[in-house]
Amino acid sequence: MAATSSFYPDLRIVPFASIKLQEYVQKTRARGLAALIKKEGVLRHPPIVTRSFNGSYLHLDGANRITAVSILGHHSCLVQEVDYSDPHQVRLTSWSHLTTVDKKKFLDAISRYPKVKVHQQTNFDHRMLLRPDILCVAVFVDGDVYEARCKTSFANFVGEMGEIVDLYEESRVERVFSESPWTPKSIRIRFDRYPEHNVLLMFPTFSPQQVMTVTDRGVLMPAGLTRHVVYRRKLNVNLPLSYLSIASMEEANKKLQKFLQKRIVRLYEEPIIYFE
């Protein structure tokens, strides 16, 4: 499709075969999302992808949405493409997880991993997350602080991190973040806001190169760790699902651009706070 015919060239419909996921899918969440998308009859928010080494697309955000659309039997998915190497388009940070665990069982389980060492610390310091061997830092509501460390290859390192996340996959998890380094005060604010949870797990931030490299080696990031902040992200596109069953990608994208030209958009240049 010629560039001149694209009203929003970063929005396109691509076949599932060309999309590679970079993180594990939360299957229960994906099935629930599939039911919701089917009920609404539209795909509201396009998943975020970037062009990979071999010309395919690497998913950055929206693994559950991609999987949900696939569950519904469609051939393709609407995506928004960004340049992973351009920090003006996308910035990679990490989510922290606020959840509930049995403290003793959780720490004992991590301690049983052969390559992982658990260390209790007197106080929390955000610089702990800069250690090259840090898997995660766990701060409990009672003030106890633990580090999980692992010295191994990067691919195995990501795998060990996934094992920790799997320990609480059945629990409710609040994904939280702090634009500034975490402090005991900001951690306490999160516990006050979510009094039902008893632990905050913080993870190191990876680079785009690390994410692409480890995915290229067939290793997936744990679900809900990579946080991609996208400049001018497209939301509420509300594309009818029928567009995702058009066999010809050229025809599908021509119809997509005609659909987008009829939409009314709002552009917020300044940061906003949106109450849901």
Image: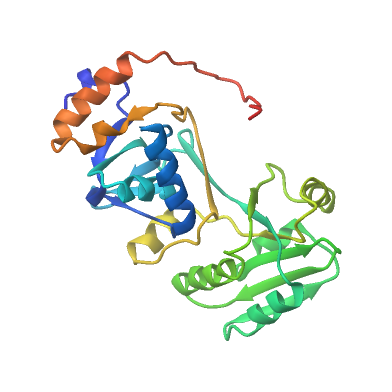
Q: Nearer the viewer, residue 87 or 198?
A: 198
User: Colour scheme of this structure image?
Assistant: rainbow
| Residue at image location 44% in from the left, 16% down from the top | 265
Q: Is residue 168 above or below residue 23?
A: below
Q: Quadrant of residue 255?
A: top left
Q: Is residue 33 above or below residue 98?
A: above
Residue 44 can be seen, yes or no = yes
- Please, which residue is most extreme toward the front here? 39
Q: Is residue 154 above or below residue 253?
A: below
x, y percentage for residue 40? 41, 32
Q: Quadrant of residue 100?
A: bottom right
**Drawn side of residue 242 relative to residue 178, left or right:** left
| Residue at image location 75% in from the left, 70% down from the top | 146
Q: Is residue 73 above or below residue 37?
A: below
**Drawn side of residue 260 relative to residue 228, left or right:** left
x, y percentage for residue 274? 63, 27
Q: From the image, which quarter does the C terminus lie in?
A: top right
Q: Nearer the viewer, residue 249 or 41?
A: 41
x, y percentage for residue 75? 22, 44
Q: From the image, which quarter does the N terminus lie in?
A: top left
